[in-house]
Amino acid sequence: MKKLLSWLLVLAMVMAIAPAAFAEEEDLTWGLTPFEEPQTLRIGFFTGSPLSYPFLFADKLGVFDALNIELEYICFTGGPAMMEANAEWDIASCGMGGLCNGLKGYDFSLIDITDFEENLALFAREGSDIANDPENPEVWKGAACVYPTGTTAQAVLVKYLTNIGLNLEDVESVNMDNANALTGFNGGTGDVLGCWNAIALSAEDAGYVRISDSGQLGIPMACGTFATQEILEDNFDLVVTACIVFHKAVEWCYESDENMAQAAEWYLEHCDEEGFLCNEDVAKRTMDWYRGPTTQEWIDLYTKTSPDDAGLYTSRDLLEVEKDIMLGLDFFISQGNYSNEDRTSYLDNCRIDPSVALAAAEVLGIEVE
């Protein structure tokens, strides 16, 4: 009798555990319906910038496996290079410089916003005239500024110079990509350094003085995801699902300190695999700076409208996401990289496409205004 009772107790425990384990496995779909046939999605992935990483976090958690989706990562460290290599990916995430480049030269649809970068920073050498008196325009004149030209680092530099009564012609621009700019600065090149994310934090740790950044200047730069016309036409549902998972992964990061710590660990692991300069502390601080939209915030960006803040476009009210993109684009227009005709064309042709966000809202049962 005692043996029978023991077996019954074990059986009851197994039956109690099994549904819980099954429920946990089901939770990996995050409430989405798995695809019946295996799917493959090629992602243009921005190494070192958190704007891409929620895809990786969801992948590590097993969500894409649960949905019968395999991700292929095609890694880049610059938006323009990512755009040029568009035959290699179906969707691709990059910063404002890459977004403007993609809108100008290609027919991609901007379907998502993945970050608002506040850690686009300017640094000077400790003890230098600029570090000691950064708001004095005289100490900036002729200064050699090392940064990736044509990127949001340039927009931040322009904004800061404008605030103190100067423009880009008052300084010397030295073009180096994000990581190499810090390397060159460490080697003695330049008086001012412009960089972002993990590289900016490494510059801080090297003792350079943070003069300002996009957050302080009130110009957090939108980052986003492009989709090719082919993937939107051939597998629209896959794109919708991937974007929903991305933003649910953002929410997962924000749920707890433990989740964010795990995200930072995966971020560092990937940086190490790709040979990108980082360490444990920098990875944690990089993720602390991350400002990715939640699912609801993403859908709001693509559904809520109001007049163009710049007053340049009057044909219709703009989506909030369109206004965010125009904020960055207008900086590049002011530098002659793009024209107001480009701006109007992007808006007239609805290049910032709400169709994926609207489909996501329908899948999730979210009402839109």
Image: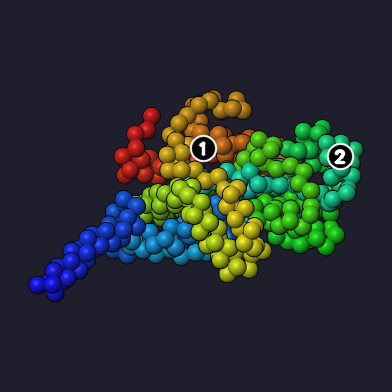
Could you tell me residue 203's position as x and y percent? 74, 55
Give the amino acid type for the residue marked by disc 1 in the picture. Answer: Val
Q: Residue at x 70, y 53 (%)?
A: 200
Q: Residue at x 46, y 39 (%)?
A: 297
Could you tell me residue 287's position as x and y percent? 57, 52
> In whole angstroms, how far apart are the C-alphas of marks 2 and 1?
36 Å
Report the residue that reaches farthest toward the front.
Answer: 2
Quadrant of image for the N terminus: bottom left
Which label's residue is closer to the chain start, 2 or 1?
A: 2
Quadrant of image for the C terminus: top left
Q: Helix, strand, or loop for circle 2?
A: loop
Q: Callout 1: few (<14), some (14-19), or many (20+) C-alpha neighbours within 10 Å?
A: many
Can the viewer see residue 150?
no
Report the residue that reaches farthest toward the bottom.
Answer: 3
Direction from residue 333 to residue 89 in the image, left or right: left
Direction from residue 27 to residue 92 in the image, left or right: right
Q: Callout 2: few (<14), some (14-19), or many (20+) C-alpha neighbours within 10 Å?
A: some
Quadrant in the picture for residue 276: bottom right
Quadrant in the picture for residue 274: bottom right
Query: Which residue is label 1 attached to?
Result: 321
Q: Helix, strand, or loop for circle 1?
A: helix
Q: Residue at x 65, y 47 (%)?
A: 119
Could you tell me residue 130's position as x and y percent? 86, 44
Direction from residue 96 to residue 28 in the image, left or right: left
Q: Is residue 202 above or below residue 352?
A: below
Q: Is residue 140 above or below residue 323?
A: below
Query: Which residue is label 2 attached to?
Result: 133
Q: Is residue 355 above or below residue 246?
A: above
Can the viewer see residue 280?
yes
Residue 134 is marked as: none
Mark in front: 2 vs 1: 2
Q: Report the front residue among 22 and 327.
A: 22
